[in-house]
Amino acid sequence: EDTKKLRDLNRPVVTFNRTNSFVNAVVGYLVSQKLDLRYAPEGEEDPQIAELMWRFGKHARTKAYAAIHEKRALRELAICGVTWVHDFIDFDVNPWGRYQLKWIPLREMWWDPRAYETNLLDAKWIIRRRRIPAADFKAAFPEHADLAPDRDHDLDVPAVIHQLHPQHSYS
């Protein structure tokens, strides 16, 4: 209706989309208010161990560039209402293991559409689907190499992450 009025008056129809500036403001606020993770002994334990754990955790998160991935996740959370991060120990980089935290694009994650509880606590399944080069698929799954095409292009590979159980979720 408003568009028709503007066109009848030969005026340009212009929309000012300021959503991005609001999203940036929200994400900036959340990043600036980020609380520091602290470890506290529950009983008679030595407080020096808790201090050591805090320092180790802070160092590991710095090495993993966790803040960068968390910022991307917070942006997606502000826009979509849901986000995914994957934290794991990577033994490919370091034989002793190295903590990694990676943001997962929302388009790669699929979950049980009947799940409605917070943190998908009642989901029966979660799948991560992503494209990988055919050569990587053949190397990871040699017993199924015949499923990959001969020419080298990306394959859509769905993989069930895990069956969800309450102990795998965060409240």
Image (spheres, helix red, strand yellow):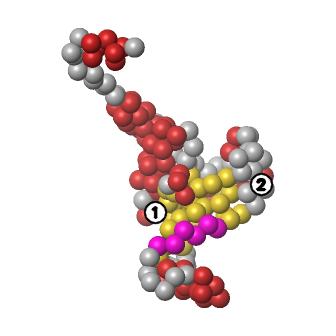
Q: Position of residue 17 (x, y in %)?
A: 34, 28
Q: Is residue 43 shown left or right of residue 144?
A: right
Q: Position of residue 103 (x, y in %)?
A: 49, 56
- The first of marks 2 and 1 along the sequence is 1
Residue 55 appears anywhere in the view: no
Report if residue 157 lies within the magenta region.
yes
Residue 124 — which label? 2
Q: Position of residue 115 (x, y in %)?
A: 74, 45
Label 2 environment density (alpha carbons within 10 Å; few <14, some 14–19, many ≥20):
some
Q: Quadrant of residue 129?
A: bottom right
Q: Quadrant of residue 63?
A: bottom left
Q: Quadrant of the N terminus?
A: top left
In this view, 148 is above or below 87:
below
Q: Is residue 69 shown left or right of residue 97?
A: left
| Type of amino acid under label 1 | Ala
Q: Residue at x 27, y 23 (%)?
A: 14
Residue 145 — which label? none
Label 1 environment density (alpha carbons within 10 Å; few <14, some 14–19, many ≥20):
some
- Camera-side residue of 64 and 152: 152
Farthest front residue in view:
8
| Type of amino acid under label 2 | Lys
Element carrying mark 2: loop
Residue 64 — which label? 1
Query: Label 2 vs label 1: CA separation?
Result: 30 Å
| Residue range corresponding to the magenta coloring | 154-159
Report if residue 79 lies within the magenta region.
no
Q: Quadrant of the C terminus?
A: top right
- The rendered magenta stretch, by its main secondary structure, is classed as strand
Q: Residue at x 48, y 44 (%)?
A: 76
Q: Quadrant of residue 160?
A: bottom right
